[in-house]
Image (spheres, grey):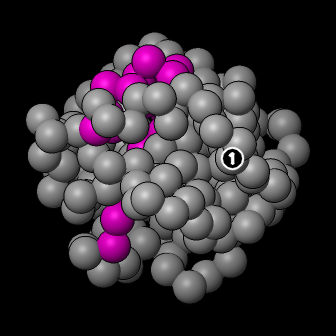
Amino acid sequence: MNLQKSLQSLRNGGVLAIPTDTVYGLACLASIPSAVEKINTIKQREEQKHYVLQVATIENAKALIHPDQHTILQNVSKYWPGEITFVFKIAPHLSYAFLGSTIAIRIPNHDITLSLLTTANEPLVVTSLNRSGSPAILSVKEIPPDILSEIDGVISCDQSLSNIPSTIVDLSQSTTRVLRQGKIIFSLSL
């Protein structure tokens, strides 16, 4: 599926299988609630679990987080693009139903995904392409037929994926916490 068809599918509320730098993911536009619901159904996931948003640039991320965290964002921006997710306090104007008071953001280090994010010019919900509790998928050939029948398209990729979950760092509180250690080792020196 080419970039323009992929973008049109997303804008129509579609859910796509996309490569990321870690594993294949399910993706939709964050601004379309029915698409997020479709991801919940495909993953057989509880609705109250939050999703990571992927964006193309630091400026895109800045628009999503609380203004009092803009300095922290600049301090951690050296880690992006990369296999690391940061949790921030959410910007007051945002009202995504699938988020609470915090927002998890990542800029992936994958050319195809970054091109899609740049072209879309808005955040994508991206989560691993699998049923909850099942192993992650690393290639198009591994996508189960039942999941294929539920999604709206697949972006193929020959690039190897790491199969190591992203590091997740919570910056939303006064104390920084590493919630999940992945390939990238995080250290914050302010």
Q: Which residue is mark 1?
A: 188
For the N terminus, the quadrant is: top right
* Residue 23 belongs to magenta span: no
Amino acid type, callout 1: Leu
On whether residue 58 falls in the magenta region, the answer is yes
Residue 112, image x and y in percent? 66, 26
- Where disc 1 sits, the SS reads loop
Q: Return the residue found at the far front.
A: 190
Q: 25 or 154, which is in the foreground?
A: 25
Viewer-closest of 144 and 84 = 84
Q: Residue at x 61, y 82 (%)?
A: 134
Residue 121 image offset from top left, x and y in percent: 38, 18
For residue 8, above or below residue 187: above
- Magenta stretch: give its range: 49-66
Q: Which residue is drawn at the image coordinates 15% and 56% (left, top)?
A: 97
Query: Looking at the picture, how far across and down is residue 129, in whole percent?
Result: 56, 61
